[in-house]
Image (cartoon, grey):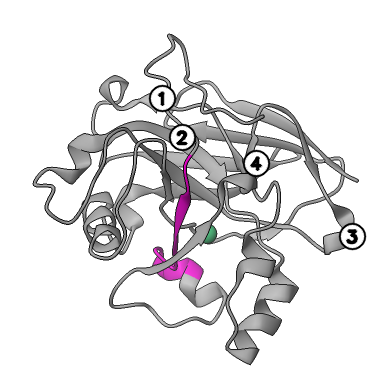
Amino acid sequence: MYQHHWVGTEQEKLPVGKIVCVGRNYVEHAQELNNPIPCEPLIFMKPSTCYQHFEGRIELDRSLGEHHYEAELALLVGEQIDKHHLQPLSAIKGIGLALDLTLRDEQTKLKNQGHPWERAKAYDGSCPITPFTAVSAVAELENLEFQFWQNDQLVQYGQTNLMIFSFEKLVKSITQFCTLLPGDVILTGTPKGVGKLEDNAYLSLQLNDAPKFDAHLTLR
Ligand code: ZN
């Protein structure tokens, strides 16, 4: 069973909540998929059955089709945030990294039909996620960078100052219509470089210059 983990000393134990995802938050990623630059954040969700630990081994169902990676900064919500919260970022307690896995062919088909994306985005195991670093342990919450490698090849690099919408704007925009609860996670969008996951791949994620998180992918 998935539980949120922490890097280093164990912090507060939080429930496993919903995953609120942001699409097209980096200009060059919107362009690589021929999508327009949004004027407000594009929001979708993954249920809690999508989580799996990005630690040790990751397993995905090969019968679903090609799984594509989108590496993203993940914010762990520590207390309830609604639209009346005056300091919404103070309620973010952890920073992690996640893969917003996507069945890209299925998503393209659904998009073209004007249908919702759940079949392409909300399947079991579609959110491998690292342990969280306490926000108190990072120098600046809004000044972070991250990298993602597949088989020792650097495929994605992102940093908060390349984002179209800052963390604060994202949280304010989400909570206009949806209350965030302790244990919820926000995936803040992917930079350019998305692509297909290879069977048997060795995957690594790194936040700033902290030690990398490693995982080995098996398609079953
Ligand atoms: Zn994404």
Say few, some or many: other residues with alpha carbon within 10 Å of mark 4 (under 14 / 14 to 19 / 20 or more).
Answer: some
Could you say whether the residue bearing mark 4 is in a helix, strand or loop? strand
According to the image, label 1 marks what residue? 133
In this rendering, the answer to whether 18 lies above or below 38 is above
**Marking on residue 96:** 2
- The residue type indicated by label 2 comes to Gly
Magenta residues? Answer: 17-29
**Marking on residue 149:** 4
Mark 1 or mark 2, which is nearer the start of the sequence?
2
Could you say whether the residue bearing mark 2 is in a helix, strand or loop? strand
- The residue type indicated by label 3 comes to Ser
Mark 2 or mark 3, which is nearer the start of the sequence?
3
* Image marks 3 and 4: residues in contact by CB distance under 8 Å: no
Gap between marks 2 and 4, in whole Å? 16 Å
Numbered-mark total: 4
Asked if residue 15 lies left or right of residue 141, the reply is: right
Q: Residue at x 30, y 60 (%)?
A: 174
Q: Residue at x 46, y 68 (%)?
A: 28
Which numbered disc, 3 or 1, marks the residue closer to the eye?
3
Which numbered disc, 3 or 2, marks the residue closer to the eye?
3
Q: Is residue 22 magenta?
A: yes
Asked if residue 198 lies left or right of residue 193, the reply is: right
In this rendering, the answer to whether 86 lies above or below 68 is above
Mark 4 or mark 3, which is nearer the start of the sequence?
3
